[in-house]
Amino acid sequence: KAGVTQTPRYLIKTRGQQVTLSCSPISGHRSVSWYQQTPGQGLQFLFEYFSETQRNKGNFPGRFSGRQFSNSRSEMNVSTLELGDSALYLCASSFSPSINDEQYFGPGTRLTVT
Amino acid sequence: TQLLEQSPQFLSIQEGENLTVYCNSSSVFSSLQWYRQEPGEGPVLLVTVVTGGEVKKLKRLTFQFGDARKDSSLHITAAQPGDTGLYLCAGLFGNEKLTFGTGTRLTIIP
């Protein structure tokens, strides 16, 4: 079956703009998590959605937001972009939020803020 | 915020050699996972360990969970170029979401 897909794969934005990233989970998966990966900070948890509800949120400012649709697809939005937001944004899906359910990561969206 | 430190940060060895990478924390894990990430892709789960002292083997990879569940190691025997990648440990503390380690970037030279 198809894996996790993320669009777009690459994005260049200017400081102050906003951006929306999209994630389509594996068919049948209802839990979606978002992570930010940078060389300096590594892989950091942003938020997790299950059945259209945010279950967990990481330590990121309110400029970072997300949502999940009834078909489990998810989007994340970053407003008022800063240079430090340049990163690889990874989405992961699993059948449920349980730690016993393996997370499958997408290839990521590489965001560059200039 | 729990921190997971991995060492070494970078490792470059010849094909056929053995290596060990480490993952350490000052806090106790509920469970710990190891992932491998290749360029242009997301991390892929290799193993989950949940019991202190647990050892799991995956072909040439051996994963060990410390008795106190604060540390873990990954040993690769007879490394091959296909083992090249970023190795990440990720710990679950209580009911919180996974916390990822700083990563070990491994390069196997043919």
Image (tube, coloured by chain):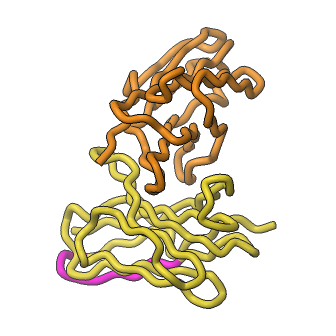
**Vertical side of A109 occupied by B84: above or below:** above
> Residue B21: x and y, percent?
49, 21
Residue extending furthest top?
B17
Image quarter for residue A78? Answer: bottom left
Span shown in magenta: A14-22
Q: According to the rendering, which colour does chain A have?
A: yellow
Q: Decide if residue A37 is on the left or right side of residue A97.
A: left
Residue B30 included in the magenta stretch of the image: no
Q: Which residue is drawn at the image coordinates 19% and 65% (left, top)? A: A83
> Residue A16: x and y, percent?
18, 80
Q: Which residue is drawn at the image coordinates 62% and 60% (left, top)? A: A98
Image quarter for residue A65? Answer: bottom left
**Vertical side of A11 occupied by B95: above or below:** above
Q: According to the rendering, which colour does chain B have?
A: orange
Query: In which quadrant is the C terminus of chain B drawn?
Result: top right
Q: Which residue is drawn at the image coordinates 46% and 66% (left, top)? A: A34
Q: Front-most of B43 and B12?
A: B43
Q: Front-most of A63 and A106?
A: A63
**Vertical side of B91 occupied by A45: above or below:** below
